[in-house]
Amino acid sequence: MKKKVSIIGGGTAGLFLASFLDADKFDITIYDQKASAGRKFLVAGDGGFNLTHAEQMDSFKSRYTPAKFLDKVLAHFSNQDLRNHLSALGIPTFIGSSGKVFPEKGIKPIKVLKTIESHLINKGVKFEFNKRFVGWDADESILFSDGQAISSTYVIFALGGASWKVTGADGLWYNVFQNRGIKLKPFTASNCAFKVDWSSAFLEKHEGKPLKNISITIDNSTQVGEAVITKFGLEGNAIYGLSPTIQKHLSSAEETLVYIDFKPMLTLNKIIDKLQKSSLNTSRALSESLKISKAALFLLKENMTKEAFLDVQCLAQKIKQFPLIIQEAAPIDEAISTGGGLSLDAVNTDFELRQIRGQFCIGEMLAWDAPTGGYLIQACASMGFYLASHLNENYSFN
Ligand SMILES: Cc1cc2nc3c(=O)[nH]c(=O)nc-3n(C[C@H](O)[C@H](O)[C@H](O)COP(=O)(O)OP(=O)(O)OC[C@H]3O[C@@H](n4cnc5c(N)ncnc54)[C@H](O)[C@@H]3O)c2cc1C
């Protein structure tokens, strides 16, 4: 007789978990509060479906916060394993110039989702929609808002974070787990825009423009990439990945300063050398010899005295380390992902809730974080694979 497995949450992590569970051993049902599965997975596909990243696993693993939390899981199911799995399902992928991995050209996000769903349906996985998990009854059965209680050998929660509520990831499960006495960490916006108090003169000229090929640093964390100047502040991959560190500073009483390097490919000395050798005036030397963007030039001029701007050493220093005060994060609902959620102490190394045997949590609902760029989807898939392998190998309570 097959054991019943209930997956609560049919998003990225829940769907991947179901694809790896052994359907000969388990009677698998995915429950979701929305009327269809994988809504955030689809949203992630909107701006280019970045499924994972092709970088070497050693540096790949280092992208996750807290460090080492996912090492074991990623070793079991790597970026290449995810590509192989998708390819076996009929979704070949390619590596873009930045190392990001996408479905091959012409394969739309909906096709990726439908292919995964068809694979699940073919192996006998059932879906039940409009089922909202609201708690447990006295014998640990799962309760839904319509009054139904289900009991299963294994329950896996994959309820997601708390951004883009429209996709179903509303984070309301937080209170349900809190009422149960399970340890949680408050949600924070991650991979999000950050507020900067730009001058109106700067915005008037440069709102909407990208600062390309820059790096941004806070503490020991640096992100290279692009950041777009918006009315609110800055957004883009050069700042998203710094979210955990920026949020840590924002939650303290100190001022939160990040440093932009407008020329990360050039050393300080090289910049000084180029400026000294140029026969052009300083502004033209910046534009023509150093290819500093107009927006960066504006920021440098606006934030330096004339004397400092004309002093090559001072100017080069500012180009390499331009300080910017971050005031706050964008609202959680607008963030690509959320930090916080279920405390990692609340589960054991197999993602089983310490307080409820046979019930597990995976995906973004756990309090880990990573930059966008494929690392989030990869982590969800790897956790799904790891837990499925564990359950497939005849999990025992002893
Ligand atoms: C705009 C955007 C772009 C993104 N781009 C990328 C990208 O390019 N690369 C990348 O790696 N990641 C990207 N992500 C992030 C990625 O999509 C998520 O990290 C990932 O989907 C999280 O998977 P999950 O299964 O943990 O949660 P989700 O996919 O959010 O799934 C959670 C599921 O649980 C259900 N649920 C919640 N509460 C209940 C309840 N009480 N009862 C029943 N069901 C419930 C929800 O309806 C939902 O279906 C992006 C996200 C956004 C918003």
Image (cartoon, helix red, strand yellow):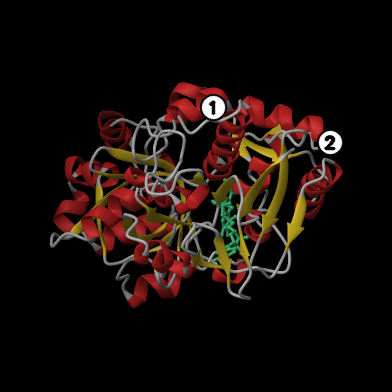
Residue at 66%, 35% in the rendered image: 96
Is 117 left, or right, of 231 in this rendering?
A: right
Quarter of the rendering occupied by the C terminus: top left
Quarter of the rendering occupied by the N terminus: top right
Amino acid identity at mark 2? Gly
Mark 1 CB within 8 Å of ligand 1? no
Image quarter where ligand 1 lies: bottom right
Residue 101: percent from the left, percent from the top? 65, 36
Q: Identify the residue position indicated by label 2 in the image.
A: 90
Q: What SS does tag 2 mark? A: loop
* Residue 187 image-quadrant placement: bottom left
Does residue 271 appear in this view?
Answer: yes
Residue at 31%, 73% in the rendered image: 199
Of the two numbered discs 2 and 1 in the rendering, the one whose residue sits closer to the viewer: 2
Residue 112: percent from the left, percent from the top? 77, 47
Q: Identify the residue position indicated by label 1 in the image.
A: 55
Amino acid identity at mark 1? Glu
Dot 2, crowdedness within 10 Å: few (<14), some or many (≥20)?
some
Q: How many marks can you see?
A: 2
State which tag comes first along the sequence, 2 or 1.
Answer: 1
Residue 288 vs residue 334, the one in the foreground: 334
